[in-house]
Amino acid sequence: MLETLLEEFSLLREQEMMDLFHGRGKKERKVVGIYCTYCPKELILAAGALPVGLCGTREETISAAEQDLPRNLCPLIKSSYGYAKTGKCPFFYFSDLIVGETTCDGKKKMFEIMSTFKPVHVMQLPHLREAGAGISLWRGELHRLRARLEREFNVEIDDAAIWEAIEVLDREREVVKAICDLNQLDPPPLSGLDLLTITWSKGYCSDKEEVLARLKEIYVAAQRPDGQKNKRRKGAPRILLTGCPVGIGSEKVIRLVEEQGGYVVAMENCTGYKRLELQVDRSIKDPYEALARKYYSIPCSCMSPNKSRLELLERMISNFSVNAVIDLTWQACHTYNIEAKTVGSMVKKMGLPYLHLESDYANSDVGSLQIRIGALLELVAAVPRRW
């Protein structure tokens, strides 16, 4: 039952793609391509458009991207740009507008080149977390995005539509968090690949009520003893994955952990748990202020200081009874690479093994990754359980 539901859920992206191919001329469905968790999807939904993630997670288009971009650049940026340049991503092709954010220098400059062949709107993200002016600046960026959406799509976005979109996405996050929290059990009912399928696929369906209904079915099925796809064993090493985003196609670390007998019970990165705790404060009357405060609280390494990421990791390590932490950095992602030292110190102070991996989208390092991950799992098995 659970396996069938997850397989059907993973097809949402393909189904939406086919709808766009066959219904584009008959139904004026606007599409907005996004690249980051900081993008306020509520404003896009309030404009009557569909937000779709365009982050590249596969190696196949990187060689094309390197004709324009440096080779020693983050693989996520190169893959994303490669899909845009080659036209191999139908969601990019159908996007009426691209919304980017200045989360890193590489993306910022990529958007400059991308704007030569696609309409692009770049939001200027303040990076000083504790600066009082940051919220005001970010709220202004939300107003600027609203004006661009209204101009591009010839619509008027009123506060009622924004609050309606807020309610829809808050419900979605609440259910996804509840599903992820099921992995606090031993054995965990969901594999790391299951978690990735859920968090990755939910953003590719224009019918949010359908997504919500399917998520609720997965939540119920995952709680049934016979709902577990495999007979998972109690006491297996429980791994938390943190660091850079992981997507379908760049999940090699998750696969290597689970092929060697461990469980990735939780993922803190922005394609995982990072934003699931963040709900919009309904007591704030201004929806732009409420959204600005929610999104500005995302604990990304582009923020400085980034104490909230450490606080989130500490909670997750405890709540999910984690035995070890793997911190994955994609090559040339400087903020996560530098932050690895702080994360590693915190994890070791908690008495847990910590493994920092730096990789890219290629499979040339799978052998060495397998050895290092295998050694970590052996270490976990040899160390007395803390929880």
Image (tube, helix red, strand yellow):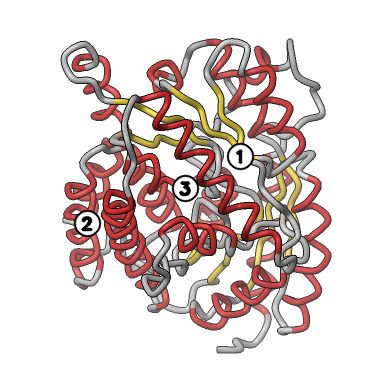
Q: In the picture provided, is 376 more to the left or to the right than 24?
A: right
Q: Quadrant of the C terminus?
A: bottom right
Please name whichever residue, 185 or 149, is drawn nearer the observer in this view of the structure. Answer: 149
Q: Are marks 1 and 3 in contact (CB under 8 Å)?
A: no
Q: Secondary structure at mark 3?
A: loop
Please tell me whether mark 1 sits on a helix, a strand or a loop.
strand
Q: Name which of mark 1 and mark 3 comes first in the sequence.
A: 3
Q: Amino acid at mark 2?
A: Leu
Q: Secondary structure at mark 2?
A: helix
Residue 168 screen position, x and y as percent? 27, 55
The residue at the point 51 percent across, 27 percent down is 98
**Residues at discs 3 and 2 in contact (Cβ within 8 Å):** no
Q: Which residue: 41% across, 21% down?
A: 96
Residue 40 is labelled as 3
Dot 3 crowding, Cα within 10 Å, few <14, some 14–19, many 20+:
many
Label 3 vs 2, first from the N-terminus: 2
Q: Nearer the viewer, mark 2 or mark 1?
A: 1
Q: To which residue does mark 2 refer? A: 2
79 with respect to 342 (left or right): left
Residue 123 is marked as 1
Under mark 3, the amino acid is Pro
Give me the C-alpha separation between circle 1 and circle 3. Answer: 10 Å
Q: Is residue 161 above or below residue 324?
A: above
Residue at 26%, 15% (x, y): give it: 21
User: Residue 372: x, y in percent?
Assistant: 73, 55
Report the amino acid beneath label 1: Met
Quarter holding the N terminus is bottom left
Front position among marks 3 and 2:
3
Residue 276 higher or lower than 49, as above or below: below
